[in-house]
Structures are given as structure tokens and as C-alpha cells.
Amino acid sequence: MDDTEIEDLIAAEVRRQTNGLEMIPSENHTSGDVLTALGSRLTDKYSEGYPGMRYYGGCENVDKIENLARDRAKKLFGSTHANVQAHSGCPANLAAYYALLDPGDMLMGLSLVHGGHMTHGLKLNFSSTFYNAVQYHVGKDGYIDIDEMYKLAKEHKPKLIVAGGSAYARVYEWAKYKDVADSVGAYLLADMSHVAGLVAGGVYPSPVGIADVVTTTTHKTLRGPRGALILANGLPSNPLKKPERTRENIPSLIDRAIIPGLQGGPHNHQTAAIAVALREAMQPEFKAYAKQIIDNAQTIATELLKRDYTLVSGGTDSHLLLIDVTNKSISGKDAEKALGKAGITVNKNTVPFDPRSAFDPSGIRMGTPALTTRGMKENEMIQITEWIDQALRHHDDEKMLNKLSKQIQEFAKAFPLPN
Ligand code: DSN
């Protein structure tokens, strides 16, 4: 590259990822093929519209690419419709709201502090400024409180209920949320961003066929590039005609919400990379990968419990763990920092009923998708948990953290990043 400043920084980031352990549960390491598609000339092409109905010439190749991505998404997740153009998760959720709600309508989602996502109705987010939002919670046991959902739904009559989140370690009981939605005639949107790869691998329940709309990012457990899918069942989409707002028209409503509603040109390099990742997720090895992600997370949970850590909900059914580190006399922020110095990347996170702020919360969130991509299994998880514990116990001891970082760097050599 001519731009050596950027070249050096990219190299530094690759070194950081290679030498350390990425344990942010929403991160992963994509394949070389995904990177090849992302770094291709497809990024140069404008193609507003949909395959066969574009506002630009020269779209014959990108039409085929987008059709492949859509077909693979439909096949992998079992929906009749897939939109692959939303640039990422927030725009995908915005598009779903835009398709199904009018400004000021009520939606209901899981509180961010209780494991939800900011687009699920956080006060500072568009989801509660353009719309009205009410938030449901987990109970003291760390599991989503379905009784509270029924109560809030009856009281606030939301037009749309969002299931899913970003720091909830247990199974989302999609059918139960659907019952709550049906009890007040609301749409159900399932945001399966965190668990899409587990769903694809058949080791986690799918919301497709239960929820009216399913959104997901493509870069978490699904291991694709940054991007999103919006899945639905219904009549074939006709984005050229304004449809009535009915359930069977959701495919057209979604497509029109994306363009002309919210976005311009699709990112064709991203669409191609999504198609590549979806093909990878259809391979038998991906099922084994998805299972190993959960086995690894559960191994860490067991090892942490042995060392007297407090896990929200007491464990995990998925790829992630939410840990309240209060009993270890450390804040989430300091825990993130200490682990970072040792070469283990996690993120500080609020825990349900957290008395502390989001900038210095009581917990940390960690997960296993990226480590599992590198080929690590249960034995490695046992070793890594021991390192996590040591780093947290010695969080003020720079010498110790440095020693751990060297050990981890040596260990990581045996588990290279893909390609
Ligand atoms: N920012 C993502 C996460 O880390 O979970 C959610 O969008």
C-alpha cells in the first residue's frame, strides 16, 4: 500500500488479534474467502434497487450476486423472503420498524441493562424517540420475565414486540414471545443477531416461522462480514407497488423500507461476502463449529463457577457469558482493562439491576465464537479460564499481567487466524 500509515495500523491490528484472545461475543474471525469478496471491485458499483429492477446500468453481475445471497439466506434459515441490503443490525431493525409502524406507535423490547439492545427501545435511541417504547426485563433469576411481558403488553398495547438481545446467555423462547404478541395483536420481531450462527448450525432454536420478521447481523456467530439480513414469510415481494400493511405483505414492506425508505445503494462487496459466509454456514463443518461454540462457553461457565464467579442466570445456553465481578472486588471497567493487558479482549457490561453506570458497570461480557473459529476446544477453555481468573485476581499487578500476556501470546501461536 502507498498509505503506509494505514498499512501499518492494519498490520498492528492483525498482530493484536493473532497474539491475543478475542472474547467479545459479538466478534468473530471471517474466512479468507469472505475477506476476498469484501476487498473486491464490487465496492465500486452502484446498484440502487433490487435484482432486475435497478436505477443503474451495468448491474448484471451484482444482480446475480444479490440473488445468490438472498437464495442462500432463504435456504439456510427457511424463510420465503430475505433482504440482504441493510448495512448492519441497527439499520435492519430500523427498516423493520419503518415497515410495520407509524411514528409514535408503541414498541416493546428488552431493556439494554437487562441484556437487550439499544435499538430495542433505549431512551436515547431512535427506537424510543421516533416511536414510544416500553421495556421488559429479566427476573432476579436472570431469565426473561414472561409474566411481566404479558402485564406490560396488556397495559401498553404495543404494536410490535422485539425478542432477542445482546447480553442474554439463555435460549430466547421465541414461541412464548409470540404468544405475548398475539395476546395484544402485536407484530413479533426476532432480532437473532447474536445467535444466528447457532441457529444456522441447528444448535439453537430458530425464530423463523414464529416471528413476523427476523433480523440478524451477519458478523457475529454467523461469521460473515459486517452486514445484516431481514427474513420474513409472505407473498413474493413487489417493491415497485406500495402495499397495504398486512402480514402477508411483509416482504414487500421490508424491501420498500430499505429502499427507497432508508438506504441508497447496497454495498455489493458486502453482499458478496455475505453470500460467501452463508455458503460456509451451509457446510456440515459449520454444525460442528456451532456446537463447539456452545460447548466451549459452557466449559468456561463451569470453570468460572468453580472459582466462585457470579454468572447472570447461573450459566449459559449459548455463545456468551455475562459475569458480575462485584464479588471479586473489581469493576467491569477495570476487569476489561486488566484482561486486555493480559491479551484477553472482553467488554465491560452492565448486569441486570446494575447499581453502576454503563461506563463503569459491574460486569463483563465474554464469548467463544472467535476462539472456536481458531480451533480451540474444552481443554483450551479450561486453561483460558484459569488465565482470566489470574488476571482478575492480580489486576493491579502489571508484572503479572505482562507475564500472562507472554504466555497467552505463546499459546495463541498454535491457533492461527483463518488463512
Ligand atoms: N454491538 C453489538 C454487540 O456487541 O452485541 C450489538 O449490536
Image: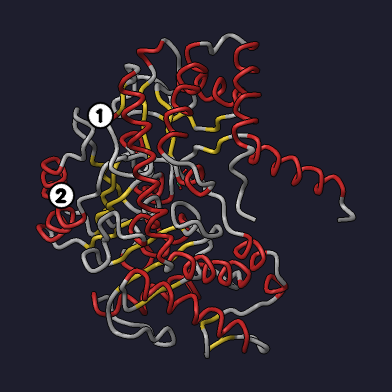
Residues packed near mark 1 inside 10 Å, few (<14), some (14 to 19) or many (20 plus) = some
Disc 1 to disc 2, how far (Cα)? 28 Å
> Label 1 is placed on what type of residue?
Gly
Residue to which mark 2 is pinned = 153
User: Which label number is shown at residue 314?
Assistant: 1
Q: Residue 233's spot in the image, x, y percent?
A: 28, 75
Residue at disc 2, CB closer than 8 Å to ligand 1: no
Above or below residue 63? Residue 255 is above
Viewer-nearest residue: 4 or 369: 369
Query: Is residue 46 rendered to the left or right of residue 219?
Result: right
Q: Residue 408's spot in the image, x, y percent?
A: 60, 28
Q: Quadrant of the N terminus?
A: bottom right
**Identity of the residue drawn at 24% across and 63% down:** 211
Kindly indicate the quadrant of the structure image that contains residue 226: bottom right
At numbered mark 1, what does the secondary structure look like: helix, strand or loop? helix
**Identity of the residue drawn at 35% across and 17% down:** 307
